[in-house]
Image (spheres, rainbow, N blue to C red):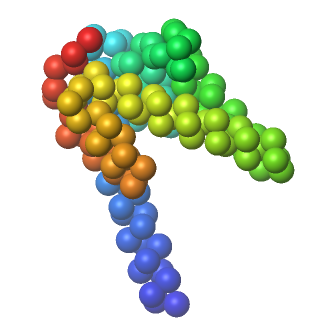
Amino acid sequence: MAYSVSLIMFLNIVFLVLYVFKSIGLMTMATNKGIENAWLAWIPITDLYIAGSIVEEMDIFGNRLDRLEFWLPVIVVCGFLLAPIPIIGWFFSLVMMLFFLLFTYNLFLIYSPRHATLYTLLSVLGIWSVLIFILRNRKPVR
């Protein structure tokens, strides 16, 4: 019992630290890009709006997707809401993960073009927040 409580407390602390890293990183990036209301990076869902505002647009298999500040939260929220539905939900979850992976690559491409692929692969390991925090003070390439 004590082991379980200790593990849960440890995981909560790790989650909190990663959340703070992500929020500080996104807020700093948004402030440096001149995005209004950068403090929204601290609020779940609106942090996706801020992240989308930073990237602005991206190319998805030859198609240009503008207004990512709108599309990123919509796609992620819909993916999570539809995930419990058998078969269809799995498909939407897969599409959402692929979309977020492409988005992550585009975000890292703006701040570290030479290492964007490496950072995207490392993000799969769960250190996306740490990488955002590390890159927060870099000048965007575009």
Name which quarter of the figure residue 80 lies in.
top right
Task: Note whether residue 112 is visible.
Answer: yes
User: From the viewer's perspective, is residue 50 above or below residue 23?
Assistant: above
Q: Nearer the viewer, residue 112 or 21?
A: 112
Where residue 108 appears, as percent x and y from the top left, is: 31, 30
In front of the other: 55 or 6? 55
Q: Is residue 120 above or below residue 32?
A: below
Report the residue at 51% width, 34% height from top. Answer: 100
Q: Nearer the viewer, residue 60 or 15?
A: 60
- Quadrant position of residue 41: top left
Residue found at the far bottom of this picture:
1
The reply to whether residue 21 is visible in this rendering is no
Which residue is located at x 64 percent, y 42 percent? 94
Total labels drawn: 0
- For residue 85, side relative to residue 54 (left or right): right
| Image quadrant where one finds the C terminus | top left
The location of residue 40, given as percent across then percent down, is 42, 26
Q: Position of residue 31 (x, y in %)?
A: 26, 19
Outermost residue on the front side: it is 62
* Image point (36%, 40%), residue name: 120
- Based on the displayed image, in which of its 4 quarters is residue 27 positioned? top left
- Left or right, 106 with respect to 85, comes to left
Residue 55, position in %: x, y? 39, 19
Query: Which residue corresponds to the image point at 28% horizontal and 21% vertical from the top-left?
Result: 110
